[in-house]
Amino acid sequence: MVDTKKEQERDELHRAIWAIADELRGAVDGWDFKNYVLGTMFYRYISENLTNYINQGEINAGISDFDYAKMSDEEAEGARDGLVQEKGFFILPSELFWNVLARAAEDENLNETLESVFRHIEESAKGTSSEGSFAGLFDDYDVNSNKLGSTVAKRNEKLVKLLRGVAAMNLGDVQDHDIDAFGDAYEYLMTMYASNAGKSGGEFFTPADVSELLTRLGTVGKTEINKVYDPACGSGSLLLKAEKVLGRDAIRNGFFGQEINITTYNLCRINMHLHDISYDKFNIACEDTLTAPQHWDDEPFELIVSNPPYSIKWDGSDNPLLINDPRFSPAGVLAPKSKADLAFIMHSLSWLAPNGTAAIVCFPGIMYRGGAEQKIRKYLIDNNFIDCIIQLPSNLFFGTSIATCIMVMKKGKPDSKVLFIDASAECIKVTNNNKLTAQNIERIVSTFAQRKEEAHFSHLAEQSEVIDNDYNLSVSTYVEAEDMREKIDIVKLNAEIAEIVAREQVLREEIEKIIKEIEGQSHHE
């Protein structure tokens, strides 16, 4: 059932975001502008989150008209240590979003004010267990950037507009997580920029429909998991889908990911905060997953979902340590240096729990190419790690029209068969992109869950069949496409032609008659 009030709030929020975008664009390129809006939203969010938390505590203690925002900084200072322990960070009353906004238009040094506020927020977590969740979060929010304006006055004018724009967003009550407004606004912004920024934006964002499909494939038959992991987590949209699909309490130990790009890594941590995931429930690292993997010492993951970068270069055989790396060595060969795709697959398999599922978006080439890639596929098939391969429609992602696939891996399979699903037609067209509808997702997931055969849609292959095909995993090898050409009935066609010829003969005779008549008449005249 669609909740119309919720939908209305959502539309209203999206309009407010567009309004700020319109107001501030031109000066600031979309992709950079996004960092300012998200940074400001994050600042507003943690200000409200902390204020509400403190006020609620006082109200529960019987002080009904308490308001943290009205306290003096000196008084508030006494609560710092306790709050850092509980919330992971601290903000002085004078540095709260609404208080800074109230003075912003008159503040000639607004840029410096904001810079010191952001520094203080990050410093409040220093030396504590929450430091990793807050360090460097505002790095991409450059208040002195020429992109905001050529002079301090012009920059501050833009910053005032930014604060006011975010203040005007109807983000509801922080405690009412129903619409998950901050998280929703975040996702909307990312989609808006990814679709406009093409490749530069698309690589950081997996559209919501694809995220939903991956997560549902990875959680079939499960009501809870120990934790979710993404080795190329981008801005974290895929990790957070697990919470949407399973529910918050169903993810016992939280959200883990690794991201190589520092800006995206910051966005990912902000995204966690905006979805109210507490600092001890997520662990996002900024390193190259393939050569400097974090989370070695964590227990394996029951859910791995990922959309790693396609065909990127990596060290491969140039790095002598990698062939002995326990993640890659079992296959006896490394993914090619120019195509790291299967290195992400091997890494994910290594991090996967015995009862877990990994669902990973793949470039189609890795399913059929020879050489090292074929040897890695042989390892995966011979050891029965591959559960299902799904061919997706083209044009699902921003910035690339390619028709990708999903590889689903499991370590504890009850049989040795591989299911192939041809979902290349399961979509609707929306503007330039294709989109998976709820029905499309349902059809794919139920076919996967029941491991059922359906002509022209799915095929459950024996291991021997895959081996006979030289370990080729392309869906088209196993699922025959339906012949949509019209079948022609020759006998019927001949009868129709004969009928046309006969009719033609009759018409000729009629015409000849008419001509004769006309000729006869002209002779008489």
Image (spheres, grey):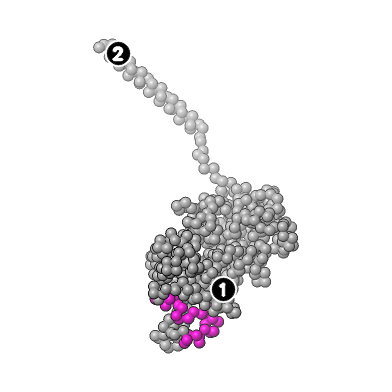
- The residue range painted magenta reads 74-102
**Amino acid type indicated by mark 2:** Gly
**Residue 12: % across, % down:** 39, 65
Residue 90 on the magenta segment: yes
Query: What's the mark number on residue 496?
Result: none
Q: Residues within 10 Å of mark 2 (few under 14, many from 20)?
A: few
Q: Residue at x 46, y 61 (%)?
A: 28
- Evaluate whether residue 257 shows in this view: yes
Q: Residue at x 55, y 51 (%)?
A: 402
Q: Main secondary structure of the magenta part?
A: helix
1 and 2 marks in contact (CB < 8 Å): no
Q: Quadrant of residue 377?
A: bottom right
Q: CA distance from mark 1 to mark 2?
A: 106 Å
Quadrant of the frame with the N terminus? bottom left
**Amino acid type indicated by mark 1:** Ala
Q: Residue at x 43, y 59 (%)?
A: 26
Q: Mark 1 or 2, which is nearer the eye?
A: 1
Quadrant of the frame with the C terminus? top left
Which of marks 2 and 1 precedes in the sequence? 1
Residue found at the far front of this picture: 151
**Residue 60: % across, % down:** 45, 85
Query: Mark 1 falls on what kind of element?
Result: loop
Determine which residue is flagged by label 2: 520
Residue 302 on the magenta segment: no
**Residue 344: % across, % down:** 64, 60
Determine which residue is flagged by label 1: 135
